[in-house]
Image (cartoon, rainbow, N blue to C red):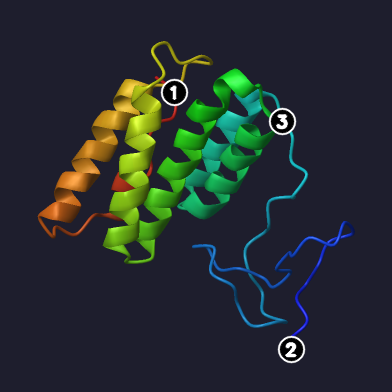
Amino acid sequence: MVERDRDDAGHARNARPRDRFGRPLPPGSVGVARIPDDLDLPPGETLDYAQRLLDEGLAFNAHEVLEAAWKNGPFAERMLWQGLAQYAVGLTHIQRGNPKGARTLLERAIGRLSATPSPPYGIDAAGLVAHAEGLLADLAAGREIPEDALCPRLRG
C-alpha cells in the first residue's frame, strides 16, 4: 500500500505541487504557490485575496481562500462562504474543461448565494448569481467561455 502524505495531526494532505488549475504535478515539479492550510483572514482581506487570485486566473486557489473563511467563520455565514467557494470551484471546472462538474458546482453556488438575503461585506450575491446563470447558459449551449469571463467581481 502506498503511503499518503500526512500533516502533523495525521490527516491526509497531498504535498505535491499543483498547477494553476489545482491539479497535482509530479513530485519535484514547480507549481503555483499553495494557500496555507491554516489560513484565517478577516472577511474583507479574504475577499480581497480571493479577488486577486480570480483576476490572475487562479480560481482553484481562490476556492481555497474562500473555503478557509467558510470553515473558520461564524456559523451564520457558512452557507454564504460555502457558496462563494463552490462558485470558485465551478470556475475551476470550466478552466479544466469539465462542464458537468462546472454545472454541478455553479448550481450549488447559486442556491447558497440566493439564500443569503442581505450579504455582508459588500458581497454582490445577485451579480454573482447572474454571472453564474450566464455561465450555465453558455455551458448548456456548448459555447466556449473565454478566460476573462471567469473573473467575476465578488463585491459590488
Q: Residues within 10 Å of mark 3 (few under 14, many from 20)?
A: some
**Residue at 60% from the left image edge and 36% from the top image edge:** 49
Residue under pointer 2: 1
Quarter-of-image position of residue 65: top right
Three-letter code, disc 1: Arg
Foreground residue, 150 or 81? Answer: 81
- Number of marks drawn: 3
* Label 1 with label 3: CB-CB less than 8 Å: no
Disc nearer the start of the sequence (2/1)? 2
Foreground residue, 50 or 10? Answer: 10
Image height of 34 relative to 3, above or below: above
Q: Give the CA separation, mark 1 to mark 3.
A: 17 Å
Q: Give the CA separation, mark 3 to mark 2.
A: 38 Å
Q: Residues within 10 Å of mark 1 (few under 14, many from 20)?
A: some
Three-letter code, disc 2: Met
- Residue 58 visible here: no
Q: Give the CA separation, mark 2 to mark 1.
A: 47 Å
- Left or right of 23, for residue 31: right
- Image coordinates of residue 3 in percent, x first then y, are 78, 81
Which quadrant of the rendered structure holds the N terminus?
Answer: bottom right
Residue under pointer 1: 155
Residue under pointer 3: 41
SS category of the residue bearing label 1: loop
Q: Given the current orientation, which residue lies at the most extreme front position?
A: 1
- Image coordinates of residue 38 in percent, x first then y, are 78, 44
**Residue at 74% from the left image edge and 34% from the top image edge:** 40
**Residue at 41% from the left image edge and 42% from the top image edge:** 87
- Left or right of 2, for residue 44: left
**Residue at 27% from the left image edge and 60% from the top image edge:** 99
Quarter-of-image position of residue 12: bottom right
